[in-house]
Amino acid sequence: MKRTIILSIVATVLLMSLVAVMAAVHSETPNDPRVNPDANACYTGGAMAGKCGLDDQLWIAGWYFIRLQYGTISRDQFPDAYKWLLSSPPATTQEVVPTPTLKPCFSPGSLTNQEQLCFRSPN
């Protein structure tokens, strides 16, 4: 009888120690998909933290979403089934490049116009 009680107490203590160790290991693992294959935007600190609950589809979308945020996948690699989660892609702006033209320009430091290379904005 004493032996059974002692064995059950030892087993309980070992089980509790194992649970504590597992919890500590998980909390030390960063939520970064570059170092943690289980990283998910639904975890604490992620963009979807507290929004996923028990919805499996949100957890799957969160797995892809954090990889998109960290740049390990592109928008094109994001599954179509979860693209509703993404905002519209940023509008591309055309870079304004000055067009060189030869025309008379005012030369600082002189009172006369001289032929020199000037830059003109396309607008």
Image (cartoon, rainbow, N blue to C red):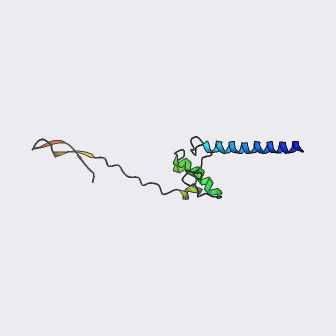
Residue 85 in the image: state x and y as whole percent.
55, 57
Instruction: Tell me if 58 is positioned left or right of 14 in this view.
Output: left
Side of 123 relative to 86 (left or right):
left
Which residue occupies 54% across, 53% down?
47
Q: Quadrant of the N terminus?
A: top right
Residue 8 locus on image (x, y percent): 83, 45
Answer with left or right where residue 43 lies relative to residue 10: left
Report the residue that reaches farthest toward the front.
2
Image location of residue 69, percent across then percent down: 52, 49
**What residue is drawn where x is 11% and y is 42%?**
110
Residue furthest out toward the left: 111
Comparing 73 with 80, the one in front is: 73
Q: Residue at x 56, y 41 (%)?
A: 34
The residue drawn where x is 35% and y is 49% is 95
Q: Indicate the position of residue 105 as horizontal and vertical percent values.
A: 16, 45
User: Measured along the vertical axis of the image, is residue 8 above or below residue 54?
Assistant: above
Which quarter of the image is occupied by the C terminus?
A: bottom left
- The answer to which quarter of the image holds residue 28 is top right
